[in-house]
Structure formats: structure tokens, C-alpha cells
Image (cartoon, rainbow, N blue to C red):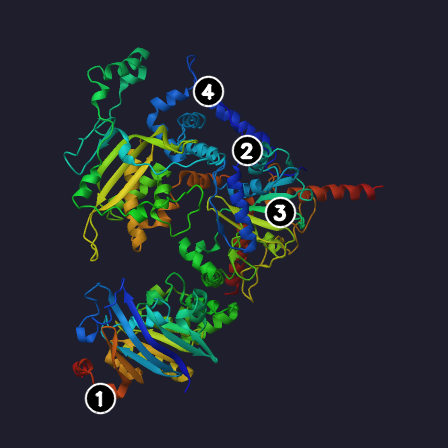
Amino acid sequence: MSLSYPFGFLDEYAKKEIRRTTLKAVAIPGYQVPYSSREMPMGRGFGTGGLQLTLSVIGKGETLKVIDQGTDDSVNAVSLRSFIEMTCEGVNTTTKTEESDLIQSRHRIPEKPLREDQILILQVPYPDPLIVVEASEEKRKTLHGEADYSRLLVKLYEDIVKFDEITISHRYPTRINNHYVIDPSPIPRWDVPKLNQSPALILLGAGREKKIYAVPPYTKAEPLAFEDVPFRVEDFNDVNGMRRCCQRCNCNNSFLDEFIDSKTGHKVYQCSDADWCEENTINNNETLEIANG
Amino acid sequence: MGYVAIKGGAQAIEGTKDVFEFLRTSQNDSHALPLDVGTIENQLRLLHSRVISEGGVYHPTLASLAIKQSQGDTLEAAFALRAYRSTQPRLVETPVLDSKNMRVTRRISSAFKDIPGGQMLGATTDYHLRLLRMELLNESPENFRKVTEILFENSSIDDIPDTFPKVLDALRAEGLLPEVNETTDNKKPFDITREPLVFPVDRSAALATMTRAEQGSLLAIAYSNMRGYGDVHPTIAELRVGYLPVLLPHPITGELTEVGEVEVTECEVVAMYEGDNDNEATFTLGYGACFGNNEVKAISMAILDRALQKGMNEEPANPSEDPEFVLLHIDGIDSMGFCTHYKMPHYVTFQSDMDRLRTTQKKQSKKESQL
Amino acid sequence: MDKVLEVNNLSKVYGQGCAACFELTGPEHDTNICPKCGSVVAAHNVSFDLYKGEILGIMGESGSGKSTAVKCLYFDQKPTSGRASFFNDEKQYDLFNMNAAHQRHLMNHKFGMVYQNPHLGLNFDISAGGNIAERLLMSEVDHYGEIRKRATDLLKRTEVLAERMDELPKNFSGGMQQRVQIAKALAINPPLLFLDEVTTGLDLSVQAAILDLILEIQQENQTAMIVVTHDLGVIRLLAGRTLVMKYGRIIENGLTDQILEDPQHAYTQRLVASAL
């Protein structure tokens, strides 16, 4: 007995349902649309929501990029990509942001600005930003409907009282199109401004929690903050106030990973977005070659 | 310097597959044979039942295969069955099955000493001493085969009745149970595989979610109710294990035709009556049913069904009565997936966490130095 | 005088209700439970007007329907029938025919409520200041410094030590919790304030101080208030006009002085006599 799988793994009814759900999500920016969410052959929490979106919207001849933590080579990105390659005949994959029609990502938005003809699909573990202040989904639905986010804002207020600082690091609650506040998935604050007026369609899929929502192209996305305590992205300045650079490509305006070099024991900083870093490095070398004649 | 990341990810993943497979096959014994799927279905009958029930697809062969390839991890095995299910279109639906027609292999009632049709203990370990049976350590194939040969030597299979009347019908005839409500009870059941749970949900959605639930999770929440975080105080009116005929409309005539049978465990508990001025006081019911022989699961489900009905009608007084709490935390595929996902890299979010902590520390030390 | 609220024939029945409910309940039947269907007629045909700067008292025993009326007006409960209009800034709002979002908007921007039980009015998981901040945030004040300043002022005004504003209300005494609740209700300077048994269960001296505070606020802000109580003393001190309720019906209404000096209904007479 052997098994052969349909294009995109899911049966056609499932894909149709997801596409309908997606249309609704685009029509009501930021609203979490429930859907039945099928089990995928990878763990809930490993991007099954994003994967179902990708499998439902991708078609033959299209080019896909899969990243996790900014890199195409991260274990989870690798296994998602090879699964899609296995079940979607005629789909191309790439590591280059520029070449991709569809980008499925966990925890990052590429540094390179996206275009109108691209779709970004983000994997979402917790779709509802209100869960920190209200455990009941039924009650949260009412709060969203009435755009009542005061309890979330009180949490920011209490943060400032206690720590003089808003302590939310990632999954920063962001208001879409002046109404619904979304959990933008665990992207760092660095990536949140990229949601605002993005030329590319951004779809967010939570498989375990069975929700799909969207930030349509050119839609307002504002992180919650106070007039006098603004939203701030991660600070990569050193003790002297100088912006740290990627030790590999010298970029000083990208989100950096910090880690201890296993050989030297020193702390080093490097671009989190691998494709961005690679492209900068190649450009640097070309410039160097030109300079050297 | 090269890009430092989880380079070589693809290779590493392939490697994990090889090592996992190595451990499956590395039994240090020249007589070792690969596990046969039939062996799993029969000799690991209850493990198999559990996986079929949690996987939610009645496919005995694939369930055995799932157990084999997952090396006995029930969560993983049920998971593989569920993922398989996602690839299958639904071509036809069965009508609601009447469990009166169950071909019973075991049925008991703890409500009455004698029940119509009698108690039939069947296969159970309930009254066994849990002593290790050392003789099974070196079981000879001859002895193994002999067991089935002698069991029916002194009795005829024909003497055992196939179906039994339901205990609940007797209680209902005496007016101790609420009448069957034709309008709500014959509503089309909620299909959790095609529709998301949007709270509040009805009882049928709750039952469907529980029937696929992970046994341990269901038991833990039901146990909290039994111990005192709740007050169902159930009596098992009837617990039955057996085979239910599956009926499908004939493709040409449209007539319902039996196409096979599925093993099912069913439990009906009776709980104390509710005080209500409008209606005559009666006992209340809790219902549990699942694929395979899983008695702990069916009983847990019946208790939780009763607890949830209470929570749906009034404010839940404890976790086991709260539909959101129970139904969103009992699925094994969901919960194990999310638990496992913490092993994935979280470099970016952790970087972001460090940024917040350092900024806060900086501010705090500034404040302190100002004091 | 500016009318703030007009309530006409407000009724609330708990249970399925039947045609005989209203006929077979009320003070003359000595019950609010319908003998036919067992439904509870919590309020029936409650009508009154309320004007700017006025304090209206609603008096009655428990089960008289006094709290039900207020809960319906504050959207905590849905009335079975009746109309209520709220007037503000030359606009008229039909309270029971608005959608939930509009109702919430009104609650957030125009109404204040102080409950007998501070657990209902305060979030005990966040600080006293946070509770006031929540109210301000609901009405779209989004400047942290401004919120802090207004919370400090309000707590000072209600005589809560400003140093304690970042503490959780559970560490406060009952009287102090009530003050925080009042500060929270006042945060948006509402034209209409509901007070439901706010002094019940407090020490006498604390009661007196809170009642003084309420009177001062009325005089400073010209806030219209509805005070629900079973306590004649509270009515005497606060309310200019009073409704007396029994078994869901208004049995007497008029100027408080008149009602206390010359009660007309036998029930009111007993009530007044027993308090003297």
C-alpha cells in the first residue's frame, strides 16, 4: 500500500475553505477569521497555519521562499520547504527575497522592502493580543468587535509605572486600519513598522488556534503606544551610543543576532536576515574589486 | 567568515531520520523481526485503540503502521493519522448511528445489580491482580496459539447474544430520565473537522471534540471534577464495548447498506437531578463514546459532558465546567505540537527580550544613581 | 432646567413571562413572582425624569426592583420593555435601541457607575491609578503624562493618598476602595452618575465622609445622579427627589422632604416610622 498526495497536500475542499477565509480576512483588515484548520504532517506550533495558507494560495510556476529566524537554512524552514517541494509539483523555491512571489516566514519580515506583487505569510502561535488580559475567547470577541483595547493599554500603562518602559519585546500589539488590534506574530519590534502601508499583502495564519487574518496592501498599521511614550524598536547601539554593525557585511541598519563566537569566545553581531547579509557581502566585494581596479 | 546560522539544516534533519530509524531496528538479537502491523493491532490492542480514537480515522492498518513508525508514541501515531486524514476528501456521510444496534462484546452497569439482558464482563483487567506474569517473558509460540483454541471449547459462540437492550431505556420508561427532545437531539451534528469552534458552542461540538481528545488530558480534567473541583457524582448506567454497523447509502439504489463495522466504547452516566421549578425533576445524563476499546476515556468524556452541560447553562463554577477551558486543552495533536515547538529556535524573540531587559536595567540603574 | 434622562415604562421580567405576569404581581398582591408562570417581575412601568445637577433617590427593600432599574440604564441588563432617553450636548440617545458598540461608547464617555461591591467596579489585578487610567483610555486619552496627572488629581479629590496610586486596590480598606471607585467613575467627568448602595457595609464615619464627597461633587460638577439605597439616611442627605419602590413598582414619588414628612403610601409610612 502506498500513498500519493494531492497537489498542495490538502484536499481541494480544505484549500477552498482557506481561500474563502483569506478573502474575508483581507476584506476586514486585522479581524481574526476562524477556519477549521486541518492537521498537517508537522507539529502544531511549527507553522501549520502559515503552511496551510501557502499550500492554498500557491500555484504552479510560482516561486517560494521559506525563512525561520531570518534564515532559509534554519531547520524548520528546511523541513517546510522540502515538504512544499514534495507536494507542490512545478513550484520553484528560492532563498532570495527579490525573486520570490510568496514568502512564508517565522519571526521575521525580510529587510529588503517587499513589492506589490509579493505575498508575505507569517506563522502565528498566538493570534489574539487580548489573551494577556482576557482568557475567554467569547469575551475577547466582544472586545474586538467594539474595539475596546483599554485593558491592553492599561497593561502598557502599568509597565511604564513599574519599569519606566514598555516591556513588550516581540508580538507587539498593532492596530490595523484604526480598528482591530492584532498580534503581528512573534516578529521583533524592528519589523513592526514594515507592516504599515506595506505594498505587499501580509497574511497571518494560526493553525493550532484556527484563525487567519490579514494586513492588506497599503493599510495603516500602528503599534499601540502613548502620545508621550512612543513605540521603540530594538536598540543596537553600543555603550558609546554607536550603532553596531554586522561583523560580516558591515550593515548598520538591519536587525542583528548577537552570539558568542565559539572559536574566539567574543560576542559578535550579525544580520539576522541571511539573504540580506549575503547580498550586502556580494555587493561589498564587487565594490572592493572595482576600487582595486 | 561564513554566515553563522543553523547551516547544514537539511543534512542534519536527514541525519535525525537515520538515527531514529537506527534505534527502531537496532535490537541486539539475531532473531529480531520487524513488527507486523497485524501483531500491533492484536497484541497491542489497547494501544491501537487509543491511537485510532485520538487520530479520528477508523483505519486499523494505518493505525498500526502509525504506531510502528512512531515507535509506540501514541501522540505521534495519532498525529500521523490526522495528517493523513487532511489529504482525504469527504465523499459521503453516514447517517447518525443508533448504538442500540451495537454488537456487544462487553457491557456493565454499576447502577443495578441486574439489568435487562444481564451484565457481560467480557475482556477486562478491572478485577485482575496487577502482578507481573513472568511466564510471558519466554512465551512459546505453541502456548501462545493454544489460548485461542481452548477458550471456546466448552461454550458455543452462538449462545452469546449479539445485542442488548439499553439500560437507559429502562430508566426512561420509569420516568427517571428526561424525555428525548426530538428537535434538539436530531439536529445535524456539528462537524469539528470542517468548522472551527466559535464559542459558545453546542453540546454536539463538545462531544465531537472530546471523542478525539487525548486520553490523559481528558482523564486529568475529568478527575479534577471527580475529586471535588465539580460535583457531577456520576453513576455508570451502562458502559459497553462492541461493534457498530456502519451504514452508507447504496450508490445506485440509495438504500442504506451495511459497509462494515467499527469498534466503539460507549458510556452513559446518570448524575443527580437538577432543581427546576418548571419541569419535573429527573436524573441528568452524561454521554461518552469513542473509537476502539478505551473505557477510561469514555467514562471521562461522559463525566465531562455532564459537567460542560452545566457550564453551558449557567456560569462555569470550575475548570471542568468551562467549555473553553476543557475543549481547547484536550486535543493531543494541538497540545503536543505546541509543547514540542518550544524546541525550535527562538533567537529573534530572545534577542528582542534581551533588548527590553537591558533597557529596563539601564533605566533602573540610572534611577538608583540619582537617588 | 436641562433634562438629562427620561425613562418611560421600563419593565424587566426574569423568566419566560406570561400574559398574567403584570396583573398578578405588585404591592397589592404582595409578591413579584408570577403565580402562573413563576417568572420574577423585577420592575414594571418605571417612569421618571432626571435633570442636570439633580440627585434622584430610589428607595426600597431588596427585591423591590431599585437596582434592576439602574442596571438596565447602565446596560448591565436588558430591559423587557420600555424606553429611556439620555440627553447630552443637544443630542438625544435612545438607550435601549442602540447597538452594543454605541452603548459601550456612551458608558465610556458619558456615564459613571459606583457599585456596592468594589469588585464589580474595580479591576483588582491592576493598581488604583491603572483603574483610573483604564477609564481615561476608554475615552481616548492617550497621553501617559496627562493620564498620570489626572489620576493623581482625582485620587486627591476623593481623598486617597496619591502615594498609594500604584498599589493594588486589594490592599485598601473598604472605604478607600469606594473612594477609588468614585474617582474612577468621575475620571471622564460624566454628566450622569449611578450610585448603587455605595455606603452599605461601611463604618458610619466612613459613610458620612463618602456622602459628603458625593454632595461636593454634585455641587462642583452639576452631575446628575441616581442614588439607589435602602437607607433612609442616605436619601435624606443626598436626594432632592425620591422614588419609593416595592415589588417592582413605584408606589410613591415626589420631593424627598415631602415623602419623609408626609408619606402617602402605607408602606412608606411604615418605612419612615421605623427609621425615626
Dot 2: what SS?
loop
Are callouts 2 and 4 both on one chain?
no
Q: Distance between the residues labelled 3 and 1?
A: 77 Å
Label 4 Cα crowd, 10 Å radius (few <14 / some 14-19 / many 20+): few
Q: Mark 4 points at which residue?
A: B25
Contact between marks 4 and 1 (CB within 8 A): the answer is no
Residue in the picture at 37% in, 42% down: B209
**Residue B226 percent coordinates (x, y):** 25, 44
- Position of residue B243 relative to residue A138, above or below, is above
**Residue B166 percent coordinates (x, y):** 22, 36
Label 2 Cα crowd, 10 Å radius (few <14 / some 14-19 / many 20+): some
> Seen in the image, is B223 located left or right of residue A84?
left
Q: Mark 3 points at which residue?
A: A119
- What chain does mark 4 sit on? B
Q: Name the residue under label 1.
A: C261
Label 3 Cα crowd, 10 Å radius (few <14 / some 14-19 / many 20+): many
Q: Distance between the residues labelled 4 and 3?
A: 44 Å
Q: How far apart are marks 4 and 1 (CA)?
A: 98 Å
A178 and B120: which one is in front?
Answer: B120
User: Please, what is the three-letter code of the amino acid marked with disc 1?
Assistant: Glu
User: Please, what is the three-letter code of the amino acid marked with disc 2?
Assistant: Pro
Label 1 Cα crowd, 10 Å radius (few <14 / some 14-19 / many 20+): few
Residue A6 badge: 2
Res B206 → quadrant = top left
- What chain does mark 3 sit on? A
